[in-house]
Amino acid sequence: MTDLVIDPDKFVTVGKFLEPVNAQMAKGMLESAGIECFLQGENANSLMALAFRARLLVHKQDEETAREILGEAVGELTGDELTAEEQRELEAGDGEG
């Protein structure tokens, strides 16, 4: 199986999730609005949720719309407090893998 390489110039993270079901709910919200998105780390998160967060990524040009759609739901769906560094990454729109 080949690892998906994420180009940080094309994709940004709009959410990080400990609970796989919450990651799927957020993904579904964006997909139903017509925004192409995907989860990175979803399989590792499903196996060891406390060790790995699934990241919800969108195309850079869809970031603002995605954040508006998710609104406060991202904070509610993550189910945990982000560290200061993770919060900075989200606010900066990182796309690292």
Image: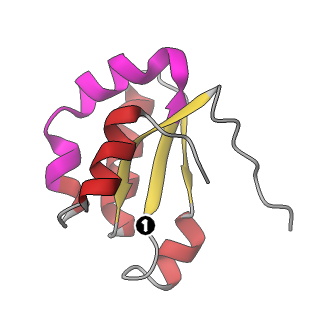
Q: Position of residue 74 (x, y in %)?
A: 23, 46
Question: What stretch of residues is rendered in magenta?
Answer: 58-76
Secondary structure of the residue carrying numbered label 1: loop
Q: Which residue does the image show at 24% across and 22% down from the upper left?
A: 68
Q: Is residue 37 rendered to the left or right of residue 91?
A: right
Q: Which residue does the image show at 40% across and 79% down from the upper left?
A: 49
Q: In which quarter of the image is residue 32?
A: top left
Q: Position of residue 93 (x, y in %)?
A: 43, 34
Image quadrant holding the N terminus, namely bottom right
Q: Quadrant of residue 14?
A: top left
Q: Which of 94 and 2 is in front in this view?
A: 94
Is most of the magenta stretch helix, strand or loop? helix
Q: Where is residue 7 in the image (x, y as percent from the top left)?
A: 70, 36
Q: Is residue 61 rendered to the left or right of residue 17?
A: right
Q: Which residue does the image show at 40% across and 54% down from the upper left?
A: 24
Q: Which amino acid does label 1 sit on?
A: Arg
Q: Where is residue 53 in the image (x, y as percent from the top left)?
A: 43, 66
Magenta segment includes 64? yes
Instruction: Check the image and report above or below for 11 versus 60.
Output: below
Instruction: Look at mark 1 in the image and give the residue it sits on.
Output: 53
Q: Which residue does the image show at 34% across and 69% down from the upper left?
A: 18
